[in-house]
Image (cartoon, grey):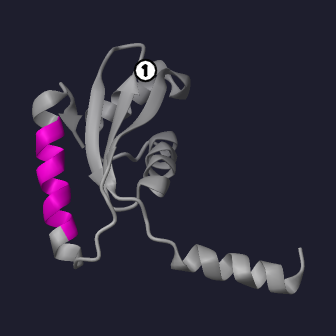
Amino acid sequence: MKTIDRKAAIAAYKERKPAVGIYLIRCRASGQCWIGASPTLETIQNRHWFTLRQGSFPHPGLQAAWRDHGAESFSFEILERLEEEEEDASYRDLLLKKRLAHWQASVPATPI
């Protein structure tokens, strides 16, 4: 890769807007589900899978299911992506909390 192309790729990466939304982690073996919200959907699965593999996930129920059934039993689903808003972060966080409450009421899942 040429230096100019590499610099342009790095600049584009830094300027991208993170995807905000609601996600679901499902254990196919047990049928259990966990729901959460994230201001960075593109990185949250990797973060959760890493802490689960290390045995240090803060939610004991999810960690126990991971230990009992293994990584291959789990799937990660994005339930909703919020539209990109030009508003401030506090508005985004409030909207994210409202949408999470909506999904918790409609999907039988344990909150993360």
The chief SS type of the magenta part is helix
Q: Is residue 65 visible?
A: yes
| The quarter of the displayed image where residue 93 is located | bottom left
Which residues lie in the magenta part?
92-103
Residue 109 part of the magenta-drawn span:
no
Please tell me which residue lies in front, 43 or 6. 6
Residue 44 falls left or right of residue 92: right
Q: Quadrant of the N terminus?
A: bottom right
Residue plotted at (86% across, 85% down) = 3
Answer few, some or many: residues within 10 Å of disc 1's Cα (few below 14, many 20 plus, some between 14 and 19).
few
User: Residue, x 46% and y 27% (percent of image)?
Assistant: 74
Residue 111, percent from left and from top: 20, 39
Q: Is residue 50 above or below residue 71?
A: below
Q: Residue furthest right?
A: 2
Give the x, y percent position of residue 62: 33, 33
In the image, residue 24 lies at what x, y percent?
Answer: 33, 36
Residue sitting nearer the eye, 58 or 90: 90
Residue underneath mark 1: 68
Q: Amino acid at mark 1?
A: Asp
